Image (cartoon, rainbow, N blue to C red):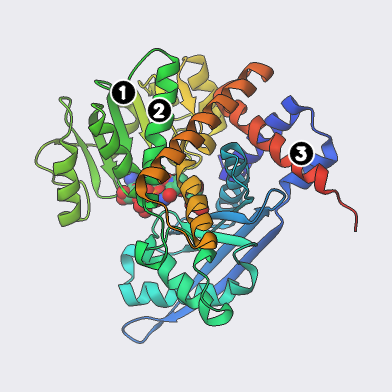
Amino acid sequence: MNALVATNRNFKLAARLLGLDSKLEKSLLIPFREIKVECTIPKDDGTLASFVGFRVQHDNARGPMKGGIRYHPEVEHDEVNALAQLMTWKTAVANIPYGGAKGGIGCDPRDLSISELERLTRVFTQKIHDLIGIHADVPAPDMGTGPQTMAWMLDEYSKFHGYSPAVVTGKPIDLGGSLGRDAATGRGVLFATEALLNEHGKAISGKKIVIQGFGNVGSWAARLIHEKGGKIVAVSDITGAIKNSKGIDIPRLLNHVKENKGVKGFEGADSLDPESILVEDCDILIPAALGGIINRENANEIKAKFIIEAANHPTDPEADEILSKKGVIILPDIYANSGGVTVSYFEWVQNIQGFLWDEEKVNNELKTYMTKAFKDVKKMCQVHNCDLRMGAFTLGVNRVARATVMRGWEA
Ligand SMILES: NC(=O)C1=CN([C@@H]2O[C@H](COP(=O)(O)OP(=O)(O)OC[C@H]3O[C@@H](n4cnc5c(N)ncnc54)[C@H](O)[C@@H]3O)[C@@H](O)[C@H]2O)C=CC1
Ligand SMILES: O=C(O)CCC(=O)C(=O)O
């Protein structure tokens, strides 16, 4: 199912549960602004290459719009729109003073050299610099981008507006990035998993866990879960999939990935068909890569009892229904992966205050926010007699709707 159709469907279900006025519902669904730009760069060999860049600013009722920039071949209009909308509900679930946005460029970063990526990022920033800003829209990393991408965006933006570190988050520490931001989404996934298991009288130690995606989010989640005694039995990334039913030695795998740019060929595990990773035997499945990968084709085959959505929109609504009938509990993306944007908020606050926090403070504050958000989501589940996805959606949508109504529409 198309990502935007799926996201709109979840939003509309939540709007019905909340009894939202249909005109307000319509106003919340339409993006504030959609930007599509052409980005042409000279390649290293002198030929030209053209790419399409997007920034969708979905909603700013609760504060500046916030969300990552993705570099991936599948970046396109509807997907970016869906991701921007999810950011609006996510920042509201986390209860941080932001709206939602998302951006990206349709490209394969693995096919571009470092200097080509730098030129592409600078051209994209030149095209959107007037529409982003510290109190307007604050980008951050997502799939295929990272601290270096944010450093180039900051530098390019600063040529037009003066040095403004708070215009992007997820920066390198040397440029005002926050301690703990790199690990934050994975750490938030750990806190979210612990909160959910705790509610079911269980602990992470000894649980069999499968993780799809071993980039920023998947590798940090794996490392932190492994430290807590969780047994990671299978992992995949774009290079392949590996499996060890006794538990993968994650520190050794991290070294392997650093040297080999992927999990493929890791000696401490057997190779596995990447297609089958989602249906491997485990207690907890953590999708941490692409969207839409849990769908009606594979939902029935899933063995996990819990799914923690570290990726954005990994489960489509048809799969949600199938899994719910099977009794699988899904911790939805707009809560489970909100640790990243929450620490982005801490980074922005530090930049504006000009006062840096130590890592312990960042991690403790993150835990406080994640724990509070879990309780808030659970409360909505009780009020509306719904699952965790609708608990999170009703929480986020209700907060944004209230802010929108209070601000009013007077021209
Ligand atoms: N970076 C962040 O702070 C946040 C990221 N997310 C979401 O988490 C997910 C992962 O993002 P990052 O870790 O930042 O990206 P990343 O670019 O660091 O890593 C992506 C990983 O997915 C793997 N991958 C790509 N295609 C795959 C495929 N077909 N099968 C298996 N693995 C595949 C890549 O090899 C890589 O290991 C995305 O859905 C993103 O939107 C959500 C919240 C915050
Ligand atoms: O850190 C941020 O601002 C956004 C992270 C992001 O793109 C996401 O949560 O999906």
Specify the farthest residue to the bottom: 46
Instruction: Determine the secondary structure under disc 2.
Output: helix
Q: CA distance from mark 3 to mark 2?
A: 29 Å
Specify the farthest residue to the right: 410
Q: Which mark is residue 204?
A: 1
Name above or below for residue 272 compared with residue 148: above
Q: Quadrant of the C terminus?
A: bottom right
Q: Callout 3, which amino acid?
A: Arg
Instruction: Determine the secondary structure under disc 3.
Output: helix
Q: Which residue is mark 3?
A: 402
Q: Position of residue 68 (x, y in %)?
A: 50, 55
Looking at this view, is 399 or 330 the one in front?
Answer: 399
Few, some or many C-alpha atoms within 10 Å of disc 3 (few <14, some 14-19, many ≥20)?
few
Left or right placement of residue 215 versus residue 198 in this view: left
Q: Position of residue 128 (x, y in %)?
A: 59, 71
Left or right placement of residue 237 versus residue 398 in this view: left
Q: Callout 2, which amino acid?
A: Thr
The numbered mark, 3 or 2, whose residue comes first in the sequence reads: 2
Give the residue displayed 44% in from the left and 35% down from the top.
Answer: 367
The numbered mark, 3 or 1, whose residue comes first in the sequence reads: 1
Q: Confirm or deny contact between disc 2 and disc 1 (CB under 8 A).
A: yes
Q: Position of residue 304 (x, y in %)?
A: 36, 22
Few, some or many C-alpha atoms within 10 Å of disc 2 (few <14, some 14-19, many ≥20)?
many
Q: CA distance from mark 2 to mark 1?
A: 8 Å
Give the residue displayed 17% in from the left and 42% down from the top.
Answer: 251
Name above or below for residue 404 compared with residue 231: below
Looking at this view, is 173 or 14 the one in front?
Answer: 173
Residue 289 in view (yes/no): no
Instruction: Determine the secondary structure under disc 1.
Output: loop
Q: Which mark is residue 193?
A: 2
